[in-house]
Image (cartoon, helix red, strand yellow):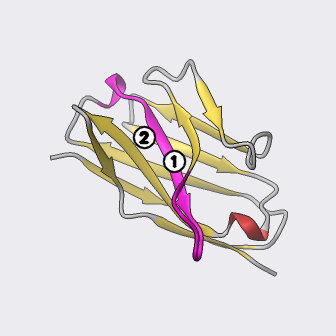
Amino acid sequence: QVQLVESGGGLVQPGGSLRLSCVASGFTFSSYAMSWYRQGPGKERELVAAISSVGGSTNYAASVKGRFAISRDNGKNAVYLQMNSLKPEDTAVYYCKTRRNGYDYWGQGTQVTVSS
């Protein structure tokens, strides 16, 4: 079955960096676009970044453009989110997601807390 497992979250000071990873299994990873979402305290889940199946196309939420970078390694069935210049408002649970046959699959999430 489809599984997405995120890792790399933690506590970081404002201005710091983190790299999130999501390892996928149970489907042909290289055939599907992947995305990162986040849900902050009291907020709705929102799209952060997305990447096409072969990595040639990316898009970002305006709030993270220029600070975050999404990438993927199809040989490792992994998608990454490099987060730089982190701000307190980036505090959230971060999820990776894929859509397969019209159904959305989500990981369990990884907590990112930006605080001094």
Residue 41 appears at what percent x and percent y?
59, 76
Which residue of the protein is positioned furthest toward the left in this rendering? 1
Q: Relative to 56, is 93 above or below?
A: below
Q: Position of residue 37 (x, y in %)?
A: 52, 52
Question: Does the segment drawn in magenta span residue 83?
Answer: no
Compared across the picture, whether 18 is left or right of 78 comes to: right
Question: In the image shown, does 44 or 74 lie closer to the viewer?
Answer: 44
Q: Residue at x 48, y 25 (%)?
A: 52
**Mark 2–mark 1 CB contact (< 8 Å):** no
* 2 shown above or below 75: below
Q: Is residue 63 left or right of residue 46?
A: right
Element on which disc 1 rests: strand
Task: Please name the amino acid that badge 2 sits on.
Answer: Ala
- The segment highlighted magenta reads 29-46
Q: Which residue is mark 2?
A: 78
Give the residue type that dot 1 points to.
Answer: Trp
Find residue 114 and report its image quarter: bottom right
Compared to residue 63, the image places residue 41 above or below, namely below
Residue under pointer 1: 36
